[in-house]
Image (cartoon, rainbow, N blue to C red):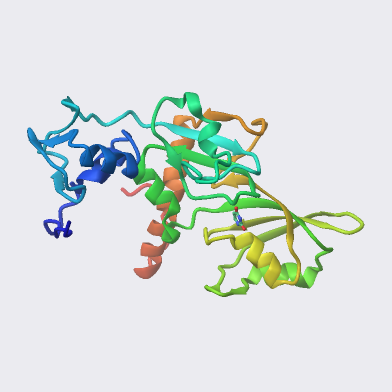
Amino acid sequence: MAKQTPPPGDKQIKTLERVFSKAGAGSRTDARSWIGAGRVRVNGKMVRNPDHWVDLENDRVTLDGKPLRAASKTYVLLYKPKGYLTTYRDPEGRPTVYDLVPEVGAWISPVGRLDLDTSGLLIMTNDTDFTERLTNPDHQVPKTYQIKASTLVSDAQIERLRQGVDLADGMTRPAVVTRLRDSEKYTFLEMTITEGRNRQVRRMLEAVESKVLKLVRVAIGPIRIGDLPIGTWRHLTPEEVHALRGRAASKVIADRRHARHEEPRSEPRP
Ligand code: URA
């Protein structure tokens, strides 16, 4: 079916399939199948086009005759073990992060991704605006990783990581890198980056002639892993959600100020 053009400049207009994920009622794939099966009506009329534009404020959407209501917002912090995919279903039947959060009771999805071989903090939520804020590269939300490198890493290599390295998809932003310790054969590092490119940490280590043997994400913005046991989850507190939202917004505000050559404000405006 041909895509229709959205009415210009109206943020409350979404495609019918997105209305379901935005409300936390199901994935876009779920929504497409419900729509295709004729179970969805807009203002009483069956709509079978997932790209049909819906006005969130004025249109009434029903699934099996029941009005769609926005699910309450759920924010989960999972300590993902390695060997779990950050996807909903795997055609090869491998375990996914959804196997670890079955009892949450809301349709949540991961905020960004972690590789199959990476463990550590993963936020899952049904708040799509929150996800967009946290994953938008302009917001530069810091993510901190602990790394076991395959070699001893010299100060010069660490300095290169700090300055930013040249990857196939361009230079990385400067990183904060701390040497945690050296064993006889390996260096353990902590690295904070503000981008979320595919396999970025692994590629950065390769760019300085080492490799990642083990990778754990230990913090996202101000949220640290603490003593959450591996494979378990907890709800984020309202303060943590607020802090993450603030972290995502503050970089953009700082950039806007910078663009206007304003100084950061230390006192409230009179
Ligand atoms: N960087 C990586 O290389 N892998 C991850 O899973 C996350 C960051």
Judge whether 177 appears above or below 226 on screen. below
Q: Position of residue 135 (x, y in %)?
A: 44, 53
In the rendered structure, the answer to whether residue 20 lies left or right of residue 165 reads left
Q: Position of residue 50 (x, y in %)?
A: 21, 47
Q: Position of residue 226 (x, y in %)?
A: 65, 35
Question: Front-most of 93 and 20?
Answer: 93
Question: Front-most of 12 and 180?
Answer: 12
Which residue: 43% across, 46% down? 246
Residue farthest along the left direction in this orientation: 44
Question: Front-most of 88 and 18?
Answer: 88
Q: Is residue 267 visible?
A: no
Which residue: 17% across, 36% down? 38
Which residue: 75% across, 71% down? 209
> The N terminus lies in which quarter of the figure?
bottom left
Judge whether 13 appears above or below 238 on screen. below
Q: Quadrant of ligand 1?
A: bottom right
Judge whether 164 appears above or below 51 on screen. below
In the rendered structure, the answer to whether residue 204 lies left or right of residue 70 reads right
Residue farthest along the right direction in this orientation: 184
Judge whether 52 appears above or below 125 on screen. below
- Total marks in image: 0
Q: Position of residue 95 (x, y in %)?
A: 58, 39
Q: Is residue 124 visible?
A: yes
